[in-house]
Image (cartoon, rainbow, N blue to C red):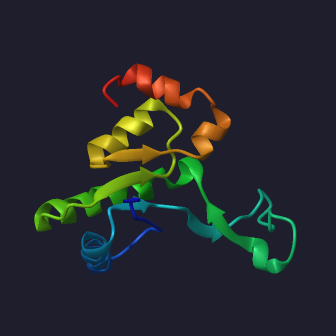
Amino acid sequence: MTPFILKVGYYQHDADLERLAEIANEYADSVSGINTLQGEIRNGQGEQALPGSPARLRSGVCGAGIKWAGLDFVRRLNAIREKRGFKFSIEGVGGVLTAEDYKEYRTAGADSVMTATGAMWNPYLAKEIKEAYPDA
């Protein structure tokens, strides 16, 4: 059977996160979070940084700037999972640029860790993680 993974954004409220956990426990194999955080992208002069229409002022932010939210999401979801005895796995995402970032996510409760921006900038990141944490 192919695993069903829910890829979700950041949940600010614990009640909403707990409801997600209930749904995931019932219908999914894993929860992957977070994707990006939305924000206004401005240059140093305060102007819209991304070219195009004014609608482009807001965009998804990824990489190191959202690591705090990814770790917070994993910690909170893991606490709910442990408290409720849920069986889904957690995939941590957001700001994984180094082997140390990987370890922080695992310590926070992630069963697996995904990188996109980090691997784009450092094609050796997976190798570095495996060398630093051979049991990964």
Residue furthest front in the image = 1
Residue 84's spot in the image, x, y percent? 13, 68
In the depicted view, which residue is nearer to us: 112 or 52? 112
Q: Is residue 48 left or right of residue 64?
A: right
Q: Residue furthest top?
A: 131
Quarter holding the N terminus is bottom left
Q: Residue furthest right?
A: 52
Q: Identify whether 42 is placed above or below 98.
A: below
* Residue 71 visible to an observer of this rendering: no
Residue 125: name its quadrant: top right
Q: 93 above or below 53?
A: above
Identity of the residue drawn at 51% across and 30% down: 126
**Residue at 58 percent of width and 46 percent of height:** 116
Residue 44 locus on image (x, y percent):
77, 56
Residue 130 drawn above or below residue 54: above
- In the displayed structure, does residue 87 sit left or right of residue 125? left
Residue at 26% of width from left, 61% of height from top? 88
Q: Position of residue 2 (x, y in %)?
A: 41, 59
Q: Is residue 124 visible?
A: yes
Residue at coordinates 85% horizontally, 77% vertically from top-left? 53
Count of marks placed on residues = 0
Task: Give the image location of residue 50, x and y in percent.
Answer: 81, 64
- In the depicted structure, whether residue 12 falls above or below residue 62: below
Q: Quadrant of residue 61?
A: bottom right
* Quadrant assignment for the C terminus: top left
